[in-house]
Structures are given as C-alpha cells and as structure tokens.
Amino acid sequence: MIGAINLAVWQDKLIDFCFQYGFRVVGALIILIIGLLVARWFGNVVLRGLEKHALEPPVRILIARTARVGVMGLTFVLVLEKFGVSIAPMIAGIGVAGVGIGLALQGVLGNLMAGLTIIFTKPFKIGEYIELLGVYGQVTKIELFSTTLLHGDRSHVVIPNRKIVGEIMHNYGSIRQLNLQVGVAYATNLTQAVAKVREILAANPRVLKDPAAVVGISALGDSSINITVQPWVAVPDYVMAQLEIYEAIVEQFRAERIEIPFPQREMRLLNPTTGAEGKLTNN
C-alpha cells in the first residue's frame, strides 16, 4: 500500500516536471540543433567568401572558425536563457577561469600569437626555402601553432611558431643558387673551358635563365685553376640540377680533351753520402 502511494507521488512529480520544464527542454534542444547547423553553414559561407581575396589559407581558416565559434557561443547563451540561467555571473566565472587557463597554457598561447604574427607579417610563404635555428627546408605548412619544413630527403621538420618569431632567419625564396667548382689544368684554354660550361648550363632545363648564372675563375690552386659555376634553380631542382651539371661537365670536358687534374706533389731527396740528388714524384 505504501509502495503504491510512493509510486503515485513520483508519477505526479514527473508529470509536473514535464509540464513545467518539458517545453523548455524541447525548445532548448531545437535552438541548439538549429544553432549548430547555422554555425556550420555560416562558417562555410565565410570561408567561400574569403577565398576570393588574397589571404593566406591559415588566415581564411581562422576567420571562418572564429565566425563559427561566435554563432555557437550565441546559441549556448540562448539555450541557457531558456532554462532561466543568469548569464552575468557565468561570464564573470569564465573570465576568472580564463586567467588560470591562460597561465597554464602559456606555451600554447605563445605559439598561437606567434602563428598570427607570421601569418599577418609574412616573413616567408608556403613553397619558399628557409633556414633558421640550425634547420632548413621548404615551407609546406603554416599553421596557427607550428610551421612545417620539408627536407631534401623528404623528411619533415615541425617548428613551434614561438621559436620562429624573433629569430634570425635566412629566406632563400622559391629559387636557390648552386655553388659548384671544377678544376682545370694550367695549360687549359680557359676561354674554351668557360664557354663549354656556359653551354652545359644553357642546355640544362633546370637552370633558370633569369637570374643569369655566374661562371668564372675563382682561385688558382696548387695543381689546377678553379672555375666557379653558380647557376640559379628552383628549390625542388636543387639536388638534381647539381648532379646533372657535374655529370655533364665531366663528359663534355673528356670529349673536348679538357684536363681535370688531380693533386700532385714533387719531392727531391739528397743522398747524404754522395750528395746525389734524387727526385720522387707523388701523384
């Protein structure tokens, strides 16, 4: 008997709760679902609109996500108001909690601010070759928290953005200059040798015509005259162009009988008893 009475009491309370809060819960769920759909739609609209402007991809993504988060925040405020929750004390509490979270996430926030600085000041762009902090590579990603470089061996280097801002950086841009050298014998016709090198560069499709390559005598060595070869190539062609040019120089010099000497040393020995002089050549 007592159990039946308790069950009836709970049923009455449940019915009262449904009549009192049921419409609020349903209304809040409807507002939440509509708000999430509108946030996604609005973010996509903003992103498509920004694609028409000359903005970096991270900037477009950041603005679109900010717009989406703004709509979602407004949605949650409406949902809480539907339940009669006071917003002012909650905002004050969020502010206090935000200070603590900010102190705990200094490194993350530092990367974020540094990422925004990189995005808006543009010290480098995607596709350019940079060198800093003892690492180097072609920029493949510029994100809010990190920047990714691609090495010639296809490995990736991920650098936190806060390590980049304020550091000395060497930006090669989208092209690089090779620094090659080849030695020729002192008896070589230098005009012919330099002309042959220029022909090799002109025939290589990886070598850029502008800026013009630098070719000339750079040093007089012990056993050779050194010719410096400094053509410009696109960043992805840096390694292959070097290999192709060296191979072509060796083949063409052999065909033209232009000697590439190897180091030689001549030593003279004196016989202490006879005073005779001996000569030893070391190749």
Image (cartoon, rainbow, N blue to C red):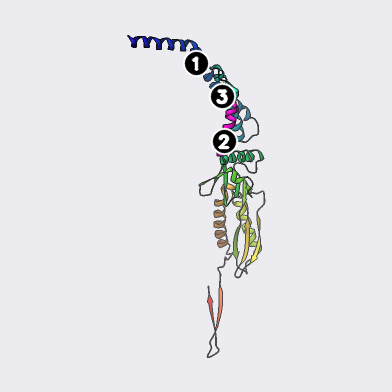
Kindly report the secondary structure that dominates the magenta region of the rendered protein: helix
Q: Nearer the viewer, residue 218 or 2?
A: 2
Of labels 1 and 2, earlier in sequence is 1
Crowding at mark 3 (Cα within 10 Å: few <14, some 14-19, many 20+): many
Q: Quadrant of residue 102?
A: top right
Residue under pointer 3 = 72
| Residue 274 image position (x, y, % from top left) | 53, 90
Tell whether 229 sits left or right of 155.
Answer: right
Residue under pointer 1 = 25
Report if residue 142 is visible in the image. Answer: no
Crowding at mark 1 (Cα within 10 Å: few <14, some 14-19, many 20+): some
The relative height of residue 117 versus residue 19 in the rendered view (above or below) is below
Q: In the rendering, which numbered label is found on residue 100? A: 2
Q: Amino acid at mark 2?
A: Gly
Q: CA distance from mark 1 to mark 3?
A: 18 Å
Residue furthest to the bottom in view is 274
